[in-house]
Image: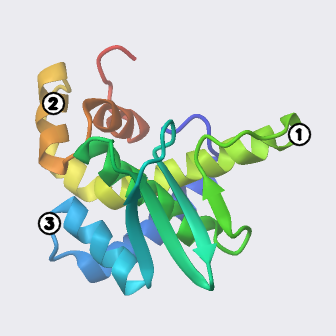
C-alpha cells in the first residue's frame, strides 16, 4: 500500500521489474542478480568516493555507468545499485544523469521526488520480489521477523520494513 505513488504507477513498476526478474530467477543472491542485470544491459558499476551521496547513474560517451559510494555498507550498496537500475529502466529516456541527493530548484522538486520514489519502488521489487517476501513473511510481522527477512534478502531492516509496509503488512512502529 504505497501511499505516495499512484496505484497504477506502482503496478506498472512492479510489472516491469517482474518481467526483468523472469530471466534471473535462478540467481538467488540479490547482489549477484542485480550485478548480472546491469552487466547484461551493458551498465558498468563503479565504486567511488561520493561523500554525502549513495549513488548516481550517468550516461558517459554513450554508455551507462552506475556510481556507488565505496564507503557505504554492503546493504546500502545493494539498494543503491538496484535504485539506479530503477532510474535506468523507468527513466532512461527522460534524462542522461540521475544523481541522488542533488540540489534542485523548487519547481523541479515534486518531479524529482516522484522519480526517486519510483526508483525506490523498482529497487524494492528487484531485490525483494513480492512473491519471495510473501512466501517468507508468515504470521505476525515483528521486529525480529523483519531482521530475519532483511538478512535473507541482504537489505537493511529499514528497507525490509518499508517493503513489507508497501506490500500491505502491518509492521511495528508504523
Q: Is residue 90 left or right of residue 137?
A: right
Pointer 1 with pointer 2, Cβ within 8 A? no
Decide which of 17, 83 is in the foreground and name it: 83
Front: mark 3 or 1: 1
Which quarter shows the C terminus? top left
Instruction: Determine which of the numbered discs, if any, sits on residue 39 in the image.
Output: none
**Pointer 2: residues within 10 angstroms few (<14), some, or many (20+)?**
some
Q: Is residue 132 left or right of residue 61?
A: left
> What percent of the width, then of the height, locates residue 173?
34, 13
Q: Residue at x 65, y 51 (%)?
A: 115
Decide which of 74, 4 is in the foreground and name it: 74
Quote the CA–CA distance across marks 1 and 2.
39 Å
Reading the chain from its start, which is encountered first: label 3 or label 1? 3
Residue projecting furthest to the top: 173
Quote the CA–CA distance across marks 3 and 1.
41 Å
Q: Is residue 160 left or right of residue 162?
A: left
Residue bearing the label numbered 2: 147
> What percent of the width, then of the height, locates residue 118?
57, 52
Q: Residue at x 83, y 44 (%)?
A: 108
Residue bearing the label numbered 3: 28
> What percent of the width, then of the height, locates residue 94?
74, 69
> What percent of the width, then of the height, locates residue 129?
30, 57
Residue bearing the label numbered 1: 107
Reading the chain from its start, which is encountered first: label 1 or label 2? 1
Secondary structure state at the residue bearing disc 3: loop
Secondary structure state at the residue bearing disc 2: helix
Q: Is residue 47 left or right of residue 4?
A: left
Rendering colour mode: rainbow
Residue projecting furthest to the right: 107
Q: Is residue 69 visible?
A: yes
Amino acid at each position: 500500500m504505497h501511499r505516495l505513488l499512484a496505484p497504477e504507477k506502482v503496478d506498472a513498476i512492479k510489472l516491469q521489474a517482474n518481467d526483468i526478474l523472469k530471466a534471473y530467477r535462478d540467481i538467488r543472491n540479490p547482489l549477484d542478480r542485480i550485478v548480472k542485470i546491469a552487466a547484461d544491459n551493458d551498465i558498468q558499476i563503479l565504486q567511488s568516493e561520493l561523500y554525502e551521496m549513495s549513488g548516481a547513474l550517468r550516461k558517459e560517451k554513450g554508455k551507462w555507468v552506475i556510481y556507488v559510494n565505496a564507503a557505504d555498507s554492503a546493504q546500502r550498496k545493494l539498494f543503491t545499485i538496484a535504485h539506479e537500475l530503477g532510474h535506468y529502466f523507468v527513466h532512461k529516456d527522460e534524462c542522461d544523469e540521475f544523481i541522488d541527493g542533488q540540489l534542485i530548484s523548487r519547481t523541479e522538486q515534486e518531479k524529482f521526488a516522484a522519480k526517486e520514489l519510483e526508483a525506490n519502488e523498482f529497487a524494492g521489487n528487484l531485490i525483494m520480489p513480492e512473491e519471495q517476501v510473501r512466501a517468507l513473511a508468515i504470521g505476525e510481522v515483528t521486529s525480529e521477523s523483519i531482521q530475519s527477512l532483511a538478512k535473507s534478502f541482504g537489505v537493511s531492516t529499514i528497507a525490509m520494513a518499508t517493503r513489507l509496509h508497501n506490500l500491505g503488512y502491518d509492521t511495528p512502529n508504523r
